[in-house]
Amino acid sequence: MELIDGNKIAADIIAELKTQVAALPGRPPCLALVRVGEDPASVSYVKKKETASASIGITSRMILPPVTITQEELFALIDGLNADPAVDGILVQSPLPKHINEVAVFRRIAAGKDVDGFHTMNLGKLAQEDDTGFVACTPAGIMELLQRSGVSLAGKHVVVLGRSLIVGKPAALLALQRKPWANATVTVCHSQTANLPALTRQADVLIAAIGKPEFVTADMVKPGAVVIDVGVNRVADATKKSGYRLTGDVHFPTVSPLCSKITPVPGGVGPMTVAMLMQNTVKARRQHT
Ligand code: GUN
C-alpha cells in the first residue's frame, strides 16, 4: 500500500503557481473570500485559503457577514464584487445558513469570477468539455492527485460515492471526459443505491465523498483498488485537546492494507482543494486581462 501525499503534491502546485503569479503582467490576482457566520470548519477552511493566497502572491479580501445576513443582502454583496474590476475571483464558503438558498447564491456570482465552478455556466462547460470554464476545486484536485501519482483512469471503473454539487457530480463528469487522463467508466452511488457494497467492490478507483465518517469498510473495497477519501468528518474524541479528531469517509485502519494507493485524512484531498482554488484564481486573473 502506498500513501498518496496530498500535502507534497499541493506544495509542488503552489510553488509552480507562485512562479506563474510573479510573471503575470499588471496587478496580482485578487480573490474575495466570503464566509457567512462562524461555522468552525468554515473558519478553518477559509483561513487556509487566505494563507495559501498570501504565500503565492494572490491578494485576498476577506468578507465576513454575520449569520443573520439575508439572502437579498448577500446578493447585493456579491453584485458589488461582480462589478468590482479589482476582484478576479469570488468564493462563498459552503455551507450557508438554512435561510439562504445556496445554489441561488452560487448562480449570482459572475460566471467569469466563479473560481469554485458551481455556477450553471461552469457546470455546463464541464459537461461540454469546454476548458474555458472553472472546474470545482475538490474534484479538480482529485484528478490532479491521480495524475501526479501515476494512476491512469483510461478504461478503468471509477466508482464515485456521493452525488453532491461540490464533489460527486463534477468528479463523475471529470472522470468521464475524453481526455488522456480520464476516459473512465463511471458509476455514481448515493444514499438510495441498492447493493452498494457490490458496486463499490467493482471499483478500480473508489472516490468516497458522502460525508459519513468511516463509512467505507474493508468488505466494500476490491484488493488492489486506489481509494480517494474526500471526507473530512469531526468525530468526538475526549483524548484530544480540541475534543475531536478528523476522520475520512473511509475506515482507514482496515481498508488501507487492501489498497494499492490511498489518500490519508488529513493530508490527502484537502490541501489539493486549496491548490486548485489558487489555480482557478490565476486563471480568472488571466482571463480578465
Ligand atoms: N465547502 C466545502 N468545500 C467547498 C468548496 O470547495 N468551496 C466552497 N465554496 N465551499 C466549500
Image (cartoon, rainbow, N blue to C red):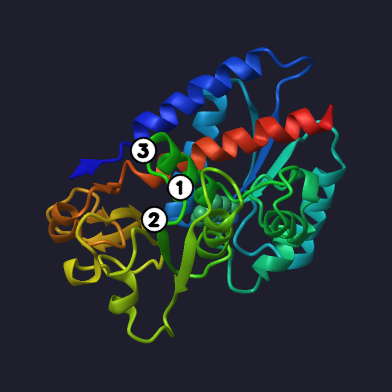
Find the distance from the CA under tag 2 to the CA under tag 1: 9 Å
- State the quadrant of the C terminus: top right
Q: Residue at x 53, y 61 (%)?
A: 172
Q: Note whether 20 is above or below 285 in the view shown.
A: above
Asked which quadrant contains residue 98, the reply is bottom right
Q: Residue at x 52, y 49 (%)?
A: 182
Tell me the quarter of the picture where residue 68 sits: bottom right
Dot 2 corresponds to which residue? 230
> 10 Å neighbourhood of mark 2: few (<14), some, or many (≥20)?
many
Residue 90: x %, y % from top left: 70, 44
- The disc placed on residue 6 is 3
For residue 142, the mark is 1
Q: Which of 37 and 158 lies nearest the eye of the viewer?
A: 158
Q: Nearer the viewer, mark 2 or mark 1?
A: 1
Mark 3 secondary-structure assignment: helix
Compared with residue 255, is residue 135 higher up or lower down, i.e. above or below?
A: above
Does residue 1 show up?
yes
Left of 66 or right of it: where is 224?
left
Circle 1 residues within 10 Å: few <14, some 14–19, many ≥20? many
